[in-house]
Amino acid sequence: MKAFRLDDLEAERRANDGAYLQFLRARNMSVGLYALDAGTPDPQQPHRQDEVYVIMSGRGSVTVGDETTQVGRGCVVYVPAGVPHRFHHITEDLRVLVVFSPPEA
């Protein structure tokens, strides 16, 4: 079994000076922590993998394809492979659990 604490993952992400920390990689998926501070642009490009975002904290909006919704703690968003998407209008620092399937390249 592998178990993780979000506080520890956030500290590791900060220590590595990156917005994204992949902390689990398995044959059929990978999982990471993505951080976008309030007012920060999201530089993402479409991915070749399906994605699920679980908003752990913060507030903002996400656009997937031509649909936009507001997100906050507890929201779950599915993004099909190849579909343009991005977070925006971030009013509170976002911390997002990201699941890729298959694993992110």
Image (cartoon, rainbow, N blue to C red):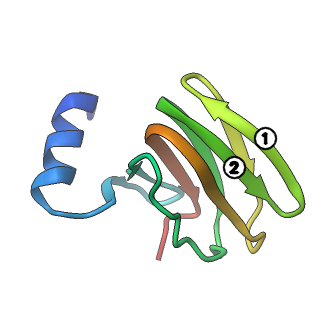
At a point 61% along the width and 77% down the height, the residue shown is 45
Question: Label 1 amino acid?
Answer: Thr
> Hey, what amino acid is under mark 2?
Val
Percent position of residue 43, x then y: 52, 72
What x and y, as percent, mark residue 65? 84, 64
Separation of residues labelled 2 and 1 (CA atoms): 6 Å
The residue under label 1 is 69
Q: Outermost residue, top direction? A: 74
| Left or right position of 99 against 63 | left
Are the residues at dot 2 and dot 1 in contact (C-beta closer than 8 Å)? Answer: yes
Residue at the location (78% across, 57% down)? 64
Q: Nearer the viewer, residue 86 or 47?
A: 86
Other residues around mark 1 within 10 Å, as few (<14) / some (14–19) / many (≥20): few
Residue 96 in view (yes/no): yes
Residue 21's disc number: none
Q: Nearer the viewer, residue 66 or 104?
A: 66
Q: Secondary structure at mark 2?
A: strand
Residue most extreme to the right? 66
Residue labelled with disc 2: 62
Residue 19 % position (x, y): 33, 60
Mark 2, Cα crowd under 10 Å, few <14 / some 14-19 / many 20+, is some
